[in-house]
């Protein structure tokens, strides 16, 4: 065996190397996108529709479409996900049914996103006849996001100390009074963080929206939830594979905007978390 | 002696078959302080948890026997939430809720429908005075309960329990995390509360039972070895095991 100090140095070096390997791709991606995309960003690029067969102009419809989808997904997935998590963690007994639901949620999280896309096509677009629309896309993304929201909400609820509940019950509180007064107020930061991260993932997905909402090219903005929209992830796919001679500047600029939106959501989540962690007293 | 407030008959409790309490029979008199001493795992806390049915929250616990509160069976004749209002509990560790001092005390009354601000103010002041905390906190009722010291927090918990106007207060080792001065203050509060409340004090500190309890019960391995007036328990215990425990030979 070698000198323990030498071994320690080698191990430290390996550990440090692995850590750097984690952040390296992140920085590389950001660097490349920023360098190439930043020159494309202008008022016109953000606020005007594509022109001349998409090789010039902006991406405004796609930005709006993405924002609509985030809102639509939030509208459907937040109430259902959060209420289901409250029920599962605060009300439901631990029996075969709740265990089955737990397993279902875990499996739902593991379903490939293209399967969600096809499922949404089958159920919302065709069977329920919502057509290729914001409604169909939002519902599809909601189903995909639900497991993330339920899991993170349950975690946030479980992180509220049991002793708070005990105190509340010992003072004669009912279950709902305990949930409303003690559990939820202390779980809300965690719930918000988890749900925002879930939404940010949905914002960047391509496969689920491919058949359910995304439009190849629409020069106008949607008027109702039954309209199709252009969406950033799909627009990126179109720009890079479907349309010849798109200037790389526009491609990178579009990617930069999408990454920025997702990044903004993640930063918001991190901000909420750190703000409430400082306030947290137990 | 005064009226019987709580009467426990043939109470046995087991957790997944593991016996925690064996055939307990005990009467608690109105407005007395009943001390319960005994080594850990002797069933003291389990006993308390039956009295306000917090044991219902432990799904593997099985409770047999009868507990009568004012001659009413706590499992059949009294509604669960009503029982918990009548039997207030103070825990081993100070457990303030993550809210202001005021809101902690007002928590119970608000649950039970008191919304009038004036009335709440009055309850909060009265309950904080009863636990000798008022003078220390009256200028910062809106600050977080977590800013109080451990002893203050524990007295806050007593105030919070008083605010739901219980008839019986049960304490589960209320001073185990406190320094001697804070302990003395909590004990003072208990002695004062005797005028109005029946109190049951589980304690690991034998001397504390000697100081504040009127009667003391010695629990061992889920059974009551002896129960008598505190004076007798500490000067002339009938059972040798009681003597061994209070003189520190085991436990």
Image: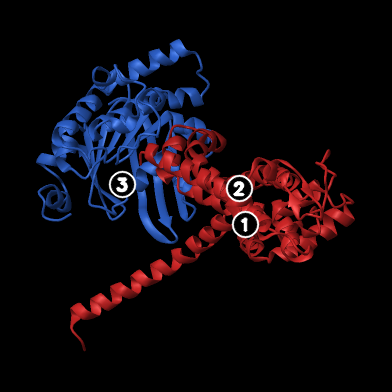
Chain colours: A red, B blue
Q: Disc 2 marks which residue?
A: A261
Query: Where is B106 relative to A254, above or below?
Result: above
Quadrant that contains the N terminus of chain B: top left
Q: Residue at x 74, y 42 (%)?
A: A48
Q: Disc 3 marks which residue?
A: B44
Q: Quick check: can you spot residue B242?
A: yes
- Which of labels 1 and 2 is toward the front? 2
Q: Pinpoint residue A218: horizontal percent, then vertical percent.
A: 83, 48
Q: CA distance from mark 1 to mark 2?
A: 36 Å
Q: Are marks 1 and 2 in contact (CB under 8 Å)?
A: no
Q: Quick check: can you spot residue A150?
A: no
Mark 3 lies on a secondary structure that is: helix
- Which of labels 3 and 2 is toward the front? 2
- Which of labels 1 and 3 is toward the front? 1
Q: Residues within 10 Å of mark 3 (few under 14, many from 20)?
A: many
Query: Where is B32 relative to B245, above or below?
Result: above
Q: Which mark is residue B101?
A: none
Q: Please, which residue is most extreme toward the bottom here?
A: A1
Query: To which quarter of the image does residue A55 belong?
Result: bottom right
Query: To which quarter of the image does residue A281 belong?
Result: top left
Q: CA distance from mark 3 to mark 2?
A: 57 Å
Q: Pinpoint residue A180: horizontal percent, then vertical percent.
A: 54, 34
Q: Please, which residue is most extreme toward the top here?
A: B118
Residue in front for this viewpoint, B233 or A70: A70
Q: Residues within 10 Å of mark 2 (few under 14, many from 20)?
A: some
Are labels 3 and 2 on one chain? Answer: no
Q: Are marks 3 and 2 in contact (CB under 8 Å)?
A: no
Q: Disc 1 marks which residue?
A: A98
Q: Pinpoint residue B11: horizontal percent, then vertical percent.
A: 40, 47
């Amino acid at each position: 065996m070698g000198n323990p100090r030498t071994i320690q140095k080698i191990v430290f070096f390996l550990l440090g190397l692995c850590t750097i390997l984690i952040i390296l791709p992140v920085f590389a991606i950001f660097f490349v996108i920023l360098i190439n995309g930043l020159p494309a960003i202008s008022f016109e690029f953000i606020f005007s529709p594509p022109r001349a067969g998409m090789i010039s102009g902006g991406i405004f419809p796609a930005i709006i479409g993405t924002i609509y989808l985030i809102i639509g997904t939030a509208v459907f997935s937040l109430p259902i996900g959060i209420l289901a998590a409250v029920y599962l963690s605060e009300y439901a007994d631990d029996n075969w049914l709740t265990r089955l639901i737990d397993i279902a949620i875990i499996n739902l999280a593991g379903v490939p996103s293209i399967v969600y896309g096809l499922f949404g096509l089958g159920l919302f677009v065709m069977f329920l006849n919502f057509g290729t629309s914001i409604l169909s896309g939002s519902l599809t993304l909601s189903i995909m996001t639900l497991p993330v929201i339920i899991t993170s909400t349950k975690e946030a609820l479980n992180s509220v100390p049991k002793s708070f509940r005990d105190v509340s019950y010992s003072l004669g509180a009912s279950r709902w009074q305990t949930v409303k007064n003690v559990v939820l107020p202390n779980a809300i930061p965690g719930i918000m963080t988890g749900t925002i991260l879930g939404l940010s993932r949905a914002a960047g997905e391509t496969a689920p929206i491919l058949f359910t909402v995304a439009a190849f090219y629409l020069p106008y903005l949607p008027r109702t939830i039954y309209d199709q929209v252009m969406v950033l992830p799909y627009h990126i796919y179109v720009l890079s594979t479907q349309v010849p001679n798109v200037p790389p500047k526009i491609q990178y600029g579009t990617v930069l905007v999408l990454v920025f939106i997702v990044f903004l959501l993640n930063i918001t989540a991190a901000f909420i978390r750190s703000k409430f962690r400082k306030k947290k007293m137990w | 002696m005064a009226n019987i407030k709580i009467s426990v008959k043939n109470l046995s409790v087991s957790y997944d078959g593991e016996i925690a309490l064996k055939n307990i029979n005990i009467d608690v008199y109105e407005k007395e302080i009943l001390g319960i001493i005994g080594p850990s795992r002797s069933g003291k806390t389990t006993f308390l948890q039956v009295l306000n049915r917090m044991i219902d929250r432990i799904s593997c616990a099985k409770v047999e026997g009868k507990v009568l509160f004012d001659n009413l069976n706590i499992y059949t004749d009294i509604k669960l939430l009503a029982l918990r209002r009548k039997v207030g509990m103070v825990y081993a560790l100070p457990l303030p809720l993550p809210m202001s001092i005021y809101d902690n005390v007002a928590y119970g009354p608000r649950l039970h429908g008191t919304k009038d601000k004036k009335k709440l103010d009055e309850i909060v002041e009265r309950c904080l005075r009863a636990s000798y905390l008022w003078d220390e906190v009256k200028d910062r009722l809106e600050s977080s309960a977590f800013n109080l010291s451990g002893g203050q927090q524990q007295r806050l918990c007593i105030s919070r329990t008083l605010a739901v106007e219980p008839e019986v207060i049960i304490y589960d080792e209320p001073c185990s995390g406190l320094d001697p001065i804070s302990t003395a203050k909590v004990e003072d509060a208990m002695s004062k509360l005797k005028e109005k409340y029946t109190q049951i004090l589980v304690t690991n500190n034998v001397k504390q039972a000697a100081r504040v309890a009127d009667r003391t019960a010695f629990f061992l391995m889920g059974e009551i070895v002896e129960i008598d007036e505190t004076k007798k328990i500490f000067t002339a215990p009938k059972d040798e095991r009681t003597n061994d425990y209070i003189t520190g030979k085991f436990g």
